[in-house]
Image: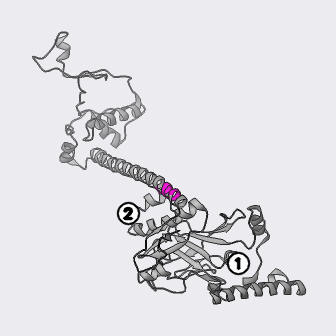
Amino acid sequence: MTSSRGILSSWRGLIAAVAVGLVVAGCQVSDLPKHLKPLSPSIMAKIKRLDMTTTSPILVRIFKEENELEVWKKTRTGKFALLETYEICAWSGGLGPKKFEGDRQSPEGFYTIRPAQMNPNSSYHLAFNLGYPNSYDASLGRTGSFLMVHGDCSSRGCYAMEDEQIEEIYALGREAFRGGQRAFQVQAYPFRMTPENLAKHHDDENMPFWSMLKEGYDHFEVTNQEPQVAVCGHKYVFNAESKDGQPFRASAACPEYQVPQDIWIAVASKQRQDNERTQQILASMERKEKREEDWEARKSVIAGIIKGKAGGAGSEAAGVTPAPAETPQVAPAGGAPTDDAARMMEIASTVPVPAPAPGGNGDRVAPVPAGQAEDGDAAAKSTALALVPEEPQTGAIGRIGNAFSRVNSVLPWN
């Protein structure tokens, strides 16, 4: 604790001394060392507009899939509000946590940044160390070192920003430390924890880990306050208060704890709504996948019929009687048919039209077996099939459409 206070006091003293020196010497901003450059007029105006102060605490959120880094800042109400979103220039690996030294994977999880982790002499312009591995990572035997958020737009396991961006992010952290914040929190996620993204990645092997991260995400979303993060039993817990004062230890079983009731209720409500929405999206995705599979099967059967590649077996499988060798040509109005269209109409001319069940309101009338005719015109009821067209279609397009309709009526899914 003494060391941390000493570092914080040194930061304040250094910044104050530089400020006085600038007034005396009349230096320009461009003459300042990069780690001491003041915040830009535009970000200062935004801080004022959002009812924040220059030195109020900050919190950082990172989203890999969206390539975004957010800086949140505490307002005069005591809650955090989004100040700025920066596009991440580069990050390493794929979605999922870093596990060992050299895997070139950018970390995911909850990290604490103290003044000593700020590096004004970084080879990558400016940087701050994430502090990987944290107690959660270490409890799982994960290894790695010097995982940073830095400039120079080059990553080998870090989150890399453009130099101008890291200067502003660094300055926001520096000013928050000057205002008395002892450490700021970085929340690194694979993606925004929305129902849409959870459904999209539902079968990923990292989902149990991500579900744990989502709980911390939800605590921040419903309170707009920095969640208190502890680790016990090899897992993160949030805003947890030990009932008997027992400490939380990363590799030991969690002590009995509770979460403040208002936070617990708000988080539980959000999680229930998100789960319901995620299940709805998954069901919709399954229906869409089924439709696409059915359509692919339909296209395959139709293509086989048109091209004649399926042969007799394909025709029998589709319930279609192969066309006779000699079939009269049908010449549509406006010119000769294409090969496919001619073949389609040729096949259609041989396809029997299935009859609907008696009593339907369609135009087709099914025959009645001999000996079962009721009162009425028995001769009409014993006809093989009577078909009354609704509206005759003419021309090449109409003929092709009629041909497809006849073939479609006998395909196996009907």
Find residue 140 and report its horizontal and vertical position in percent: 41, 80
Q: Specify whether residue 120 is in view.
A: no
Image quadrant holding the C terminus, namely: top left
Graded by Cα atoms within 10 Å as few (under 14), some (14 to 19) or many (20 or more), the crowding at tag 2 reads few
Find residue 44 and report its horizontal and vertical position in percent: 77, 69
What's the amino acid at mark 1? Answer: Gly
Please name the residue shown 40% across and 33% down the image.
396
Magenta segment, which residues? 265-271
Q: Which residue is mark 1?
A: 180
Does residue 200 appear left or right of residue 153 in this picture?
Answer: left
Asked where in the image residue 18 lies, by quadrant, the reply is bottom right
What's the amino acid at mark 2? Answer: Asp
Find residue 62 and report its horizontal and vertical position in percent: 57, 70
Graded by Cα atoms within 10 Å as few (under 14), some (14 to 19) or many (20 or more), the crowding at tag 1 reads some
Q: Which residue is mark 2?
A: 203
Q: Residue furthest top?
A: 376
Q: Specify whether residue 181 is in view.
A: yes
Of label 1 and label 2, which has the lower sequence position?
1
Asked where in the image residue 351 lies, by quadrant, the reply is top left
